[in-house]
Image: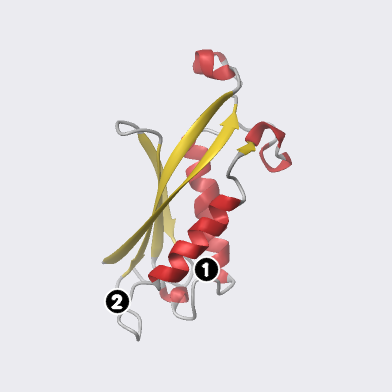
Amino acid sequence: MYAVNVRDHFMIAHSFRGEAFGPAQRLHGATYVVDLEFRRAALDPDGMVVDIALATDGLRSVLGELNLRNLDDDPAFAGRNTTTEFMARVIFDRVAARIAAGGFGSHAGGLAGLRVRLNESHVAWASYEGPLPGGTV
């Protein structure tokens, strides 16, 4: 399996509901370093997993929708705890939708899967990974 990773970051504010979150129930901020890994079994006709420039721009665009926002105010997240794990899936789904719409180049439809890793710090992270429709593992 071939893989290409691109990285960016975003900053958010949010709070959590539930005793399990202790002090994080109060409004607080987070800065995530995001690793987005593209996977495919065989290289595309140009010898690539994905166009790195398009991947970088695409990730930046997805994160731009979230950057410097209070997620508590976003109707898309109403009633949800926007944990690191949850946000990894949100980013996965948004990137997958852009791939399906052609936003990552004409050969990106052959991608087998993605992995999104949100690094909260140098010692803690969460990720979500899964297959993409039409890709071959």
Camera-side residue of 70 and 137: 70
Quarter of the rendering occupied by the C terminus:
bottom left
The answer to whether 137 is drawn above or below residue 67 in the figure is: below
Q: Is residue 94 shown left or right of residue 109?
A: right
Viewer-side label of 2, 1: 1
- Residue 37 percent location from the top left of the image: 36, 58
Q: Residue furthest bottom?
A: 45
Look at the numbered disc 2 and give the secondary structure of its residue: loop
Query: Which quadrant would the N terminus be assigned to in this image?
Result: bottom left
Tag of residue 42: 2
**Type of the residue with mark 2:** Ala
Q: Is residue 121 left or right of residue 99?
A: left
* Residue 43: numbered disc: none
Q: What whole-number distance in Å separates the C-alpha atoms at marks 2 and 1? A: 17 Å
Q: Is residue 6 above or below residue 134?
A: above
Rate crowding at label 2 as few (under 14), some (14 to 19) or many (20 or more) other CA atoms within 10 Å.
Answer: some
Residue 7, position as x, y percentages in the image: 39, 53
Q: Is residue 33 left or right of 15 when viewed as pictured? A: left
Disc 1 marks which amino acid?
Ile
Number of numbered discs on residues: 2
Query: Residue at coordinates 29% horizontally, 76% vertically from top-left?
Result: 42
Element marked by disc 1? helix
Q: Position of residue 115 (x, y in %)?
A: 39, 54
Q: Which mark is residue 99?
A: 1
Quick check: marks 2 and 1 in contact, CB under 8 Å? Answer: no
Above-or-below relation of 101 to 120: below
Pointer 1: residues within 10 angstroms few (<14), some, or many (20+)? many
Which of marks 1 and 2 precedes in the sequence?
Answer: 2
Residue drawn at 39 percent across, 69 percent down? 52
Residue located at (49% from left, 58% from top): 59
